[in-house]
């Protein structure tokens, strides 16, 4: 396997906590997530390469990283190429500690840091959104794996029984929702304009009220995300969820405490522009309607691309033409968190996981009924 050096100073901590474990890092470009993990999760990501239909619904796995003083990324054996991070500049140090600038991304981190020197390197699903809205849905009525000690089983059974997990096969683990430029104090937003719903919020939802959580996530009037726009996004999520359901039904596996990660563009003006751009195949260099000053520019390898002029050298122009220009993103959904996942030939589909997926599909289908 190929190895790539990555300075420890090129890794920063996420400060957008909502659910999951502490200790998740990122590179400064915002393209990569570095998640401390157990060997079982490494093994599962590596084995997923031979399950291509399933792998489509997981974040891109670039390889593993040793969290030593000079981290080295060991690239996976897949044909995916590690993003170019050579342009990343190391952050300033203050008393030996790296700075932690705010990134336009979110990753689960509320469950305590894992004691490990191993991490997986994944794509940051929130990259290239202007204002990503993020929802983590924990799947399964049973949350513990076969090797869980009795005390852990008892604890997780209690959590499931006291939340929607036991009945619906899922619970909302956390949300981060952009409230718009005109958000007020009544919306309980942070200085970045986001409202964060932590795991306590999700655990207090009931079978009768959990729909409200999804309504809060999708219908954000203050951010210009109208019901019409939201329902277009929901229809795209439904298409992906039905595809994922079919894949899980065709696999023989067990995935305890895995999550669905939903992300969509939370700025209503940028979202409308993304839909318009997709229909006309306009890359994100153009100005978005109603948001000309802050319209997304073409992003290449995590940095804004340059606009060539007649004075530039021919070599520079040719290089520009070869660069990958990102289209504005609308939404993304992936299955994540595989610390307790494995393939189980002969045992049939994972009905525990499928229960949650099917119930989420039902709720989303119902949201846009008029």
Image: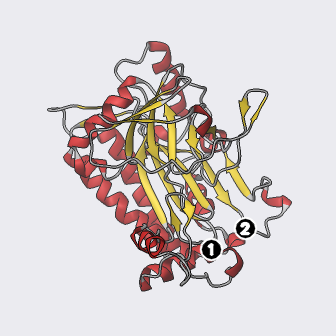
Q: Nearer the viewer, residue 141 or 136?
A: 136
Residue 122 drawn at (x, y percent): 44, 43
Q: Which quadrant of the view contains residue 139?
A: top left
Look at 39% across and 69% down and name the residue there: 322
Identify the residue shown where x is 61% and y is 68%: 219
Rounded to the nearest whole Å, what is the CA distance between mark 1 and mark 2? 8 Å
Front-most of 72 and 250? 72
Q: Which residue is mark 1?
A: 268
Residue 217 picture location, percent across and down: 60, 60
Element type at mark 1: helix
Q: Which mark is residue 180?
A: 2
Taking the image as drawn, is residue 225 in sight? Answer: no
Task: Tell me: 99 left or right of 59.
Answer: right
Mark 1 vs 2, N-terminal side: 2
* Residue at the left extreme, as displayed: 346
Picture coordinates of residue 289, whole percent (x, y): 63, 85
SS state under label 2: loop
Q: Is residue 88 visible?
A: yes
Q: Quadrant of residue 188?
A: bottom right
Label 1: how many residues lie within 10 Å, few (<14), some (14-19) or many (20+)?
many
Task: State how many labels appear.
Answer: 2
Is 238 located above or below residue 39 in the figure?
below
State if disc 2 and disc 1 touch (CB < 8 Å): yes
Depth check, front residue: 42 or 153: 42
Residue 126: horizontal and vertical position, in percent?
54, 55
Residue 286 lies in what quarter of the image? bottom right
């Amino acid at each position: 396997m190929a190895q790539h050096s990555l300075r420890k100073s090129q890794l920063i901590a996420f400060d957008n906590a909502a659910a999951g474990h502490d200790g998740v890092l990122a590179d400064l470009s915002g393209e990569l997530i570095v998640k401390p993990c157990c060997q079982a999760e490494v093994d599962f990501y590596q084995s997923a390469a031979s399950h291509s239909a399933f792998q489509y619904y997981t974040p891109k796995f670039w390889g593993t990283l040793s969290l030593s003083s000079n981290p080295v990324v060991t690239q996976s054996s897949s044909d995916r190429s590690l993003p170019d991070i050579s342009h990343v500049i190391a952050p300033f140090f203050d008393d030996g500690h790296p700075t932690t600038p705010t990134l336009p991304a979110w990753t689960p981190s509320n469950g305590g840091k894992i004691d490990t020197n191993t991490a997986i390197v994944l794509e940051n699903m929130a990259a290239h959104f202007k204002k990503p809205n993020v929802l983590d849905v924990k799947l399964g009525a049973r949350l513990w794996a076969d090797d869980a000690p009795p005390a852990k089983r008892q604890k997780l059974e209690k959590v499931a029984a006291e939340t929607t997990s036991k009945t619906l096969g899922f619970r909302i683990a956390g949300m981060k929702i952009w409230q718009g430029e005109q958000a007020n104090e009544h919306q309980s937003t942070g200085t970045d304009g986001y409202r964060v719903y932590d795991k306590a919020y999700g655990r207090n939802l009931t079978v009768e009220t959990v729909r409200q959580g999804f309504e809060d996530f999708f219908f954000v009037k203050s951010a210009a995300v109208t019901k019409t726009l939201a329902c277009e996004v929901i229809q795209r999520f439904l298409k992906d969820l039905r595809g994922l359901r079919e894949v899980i039904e065709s696999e023989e596996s067990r995935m305890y405490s895995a999550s669905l990660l939903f992300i969509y563009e939370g700025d209503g003006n940028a979202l409308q522009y993304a839909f318009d751009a997709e229909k006309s195949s306009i890359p994100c260099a153009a100005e978005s309607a109603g948001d000309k000053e802050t319209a997304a520019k073409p992003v290449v390898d995590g940095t804004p691309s340059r606009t060539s002029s007649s004075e530039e050298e021919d070599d520079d122009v040719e290089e520009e033409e070869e660069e990958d220009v990102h289209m504005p993103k609308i939404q993304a959904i992936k299955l994540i968190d595989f610390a307790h996942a494995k393939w189980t030939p002969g045992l049939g589909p994972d009905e525990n996981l499928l229960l949650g997926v099917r119930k989420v599909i039902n709720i989303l289908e119902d949201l846009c009924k008029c």
